[in-house]
Amino acid sequence: MTSKKQSPTPSPTSLPWTTTENEKYSKTRGSKFSSINFHFKCFLLFLVSVTSWFLILFFFFLIPPATNNPKHHPHRTKYEPNKSILVYHDHHHQRQNHPSEDVSVYIYNLPPEFNLGLLQDCAHLNVYTNMCPHVVNGGLGQPLQASPDQDPDSDAGSAWFATHQFIAEMIFHARMENHPLRTWDPSRASLFYVPFYGGLHASSKFRERNLTARDELAVRLVEFLRRQPTWRRNIGKDHFMVLGRTAWDFMRSDGGPDFGANSLLNLPRVQTMSVLTVERNPWEKKTSQHGLPYPSYFHPSTSAQMLTWQTKVRQSDRPHLFSFIGAPRKGLEKAAVRDELIRQCGESTRCELLQCNKNDGNSKCYKPSEIIRVMSRSQFCLQAPGDSFTRRSTFDAVLAGCVPVFFSPHTAYTQYGWFLPDDPEEYSVYIDDERTRARMVNVEEELLKIPRERIEKMRNTVIDLIPRLTYKHPNASEEDDGGFRDVVDVALDALGRHVRSILDNK
Ligand SMILES: *[C@@H]1O[C@H](CO)[C@@H](O)[C@H](O)[C@H]1NC(C)=O
Ligand SMILES: *[C@@H]1O[C@H](CO)[C@@H](O)[C@H](O)[C@H]1NC(C)=O
Ligand SMILES: *[C@@H]1O[C@H](CO)[C@@H](O)[C@H](O)[C@H]1NC(C)=O
C-alpha cells in the first residue's frame, strides 16, 4: 500500500522546451517567428513595467523608517506593485501574507545518525532505488540543463532539478539553515525544528523484519529530545519535524498487515509535536499532522526567475483539454479509478496520455522535462490516487499552470489547508471517483461543460499559487530578493500561529 509507493527515478535530462521540443511545439501552431516576436515584445513590455515599478518602490519603501527589529523585512510585505502579476497575490490567504514577525526558529544540532550521517549509505536509503543522485545539492538532486525560462542576466545557474518526490525533509532542512527566521539562541525561539530525515530512514528499513530494529532510531530520537531542557519547557508542543514521506509510513498498526512502516508517529512524544508530512492522515482527530507540498522540479533563487516562469506558463498554448500521466495500479481498490481514466484518456482525442510502464525506468513519464511539457500544454491534469491518496504530480501540474482534477478529497483538499485556497472550486475540479469508476461519468464531457472564463480564472489562481507551492533554492538570499514567499515561509507562518494557539489554550 502506501509504504510501497514506487519512486520514479527521473534522470537528469533536458528541460521543458529544449530546441527540438520548441520546434515540434511551434509546428503545431503556425509561424514560429511571429510567436517568438510576440513573446519577446510581451517580455520587453513586462520588463519595462517591472523596472519602473521597481524604481518607484525602491524610492518609496527601501528608504525605510528606522526599525530595531532585525527580523523586519519591509520588502517582504510591501513589495506587491501589481497584484495580478506579483506572486503574493491570493486574497484567501490574506493573513498568511504578513509574515509573523515574532516567529523565530531554533534548529537542533542532532547527532549525525539522525540526518546527514544517514546519507553516507545513500545507496541503501530506499529499498527500491539508489538515492545517491537524489540527495545531492541539499536534496534538490541533479540539476537539469539550463532552461529558456532563466533570467538572461542571471549567472545563478539553473533553477531546475530532477528532484525526488520523497525528499522534502532534506530540502526543508537545507532551506532552514539559511532562513532569516532562524535563531541560534534557544531562549528566543518560538519554534524548535528537529531536522530528522525520518522518511529516508523509513524507506531504508521497509524490509527490516525485526520490528525493534526498524523502530530503534525513532526511539533514540525521542530519548534525545526528552533530555533537552528546551523540550521540557513546553513538553515539546513548540517542536516540529518534517517528513518527506506519507504519514502511513510511520504509523504501523498492531495486527494490521505489515507494509514496512515504522512507529515514529505512534510515539506519544512525537504526537505532542507538530509533524509536517506530504500526506497526513485525514481522519486524525488531533491536529498534529499538517500536509506539506511535495517538491517539484523548480527551485528558483529569485523572484525574477519565478515571475519569468509564471509569465511563461500564463502564455503557454494549451491544445489538450486534459492529460493523464501515470501507471495503472493492479488490484488496488483506491486506485481503480486510474484504469478507467487511462481508458477514457486513451479514447479521447482531447486527452494526452503519458502512460508509465513500471518496468521501464526510462519511460518518458519519469522525465521532468516531458512531464512539465505535457502539463503546460494541457488545460486540466487528472490526479487519480495511486498507492496513496496524494501525488507529487498535483504540484507538477500547478507548476505547469494546469488546473488539477481530483477524484478524492484526500488528494489535496483535506491535506494542504495551509497552502491552498479554502474554496476548492477556485483552483480545481472535483469529479466523484465512485461514479467515474462505475463509468457513470465521462471526464471529457464534464470538463467540456466548464465555461471558458471559469477555466481561465482557475488557471490564473493556479499560476498565482506557484510560489507558495515551490521550494526556493536553499542558497537564495532573502536580503536582495524582491520577496516571493515559498513553501517554507508559508509553513513557518502557519506553524507559528498553530503553536501559539496550542500554548495559549493549555
Ligand atoms: C497588472 O498587470 C496586468 C498585466 O501586465 C495588467 O493587465 C493589469 O492592468 C495590471 N493591474 C494593475 C492594477 O496595475
Ligand atoms: C550553497 O552554498 C554553499 C556555499 O557556497 C555550497 O557549498 C552549497 O553546495 C550550495 N548549495 C546548493 C544546494 O547549491
Ligand atoms: C531485533 O533487533 C534488536 C535491536 O537491534 C536486537 O537487540 C534483537 O536481538 C533483534 N532480535 C532478533 C530476534 O534478531
Image (spheres, rainbow, N blue to C red):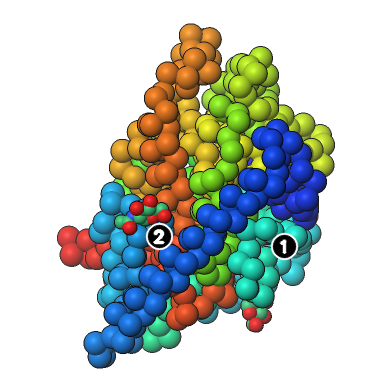
Left or right: 451 with respect to 475?
Answer: left
Residue of label 2: 86
Q: Which mark is residue 363?
A: none
- Quadrant in which the N terminus is drawn: top right
The foreground one among 415 and 88 is 88
Q: Secondary structure at mark 1?
A: loop
Give me the residue at 67% from left, 65% from top.
Answer: 158
Q: Position of residue 487 (x, y in %)?
A: 45, 59
Quadrant in which ligand 2 is drawn = bottom right
Q: Is residue 93 above or below residue 137?
A: above
Q: Amino acid at mark 1?
A: Ala
Q: Position of residue 43 (x, y in %)?
A: 54, 58
Q: Position of residue 46 (x, y in %)?
A: 48, 60
Give me the residue at 47% from left, 26% from top.
Answer: 407
Q: Position of residue 359 (x, y in %)?
A: 81, 34
Q: Secondary structure at mark 2?
A: loop
- Quadrant in which the C terminus is drawn: bottom left
| Mark 1 vs mark 2, CA separation in Å | 24 Å
Q: Which mark is residue 146?
A: 1
Left or right: 505 with respect to 105?
Answer: left
Q: Amino acid at mark 2?
A: Leu
The foreground one among 474 and 216 is 474
Q: Is residue 435 above or below residue 451?
A: above
Q: Quadrant of residue 299?
A: bottom right
First reached walking from the N terminus: tag 1 or tag 2: 2
Give me the residue at 76% from left, 65% from top.
Answer: 121
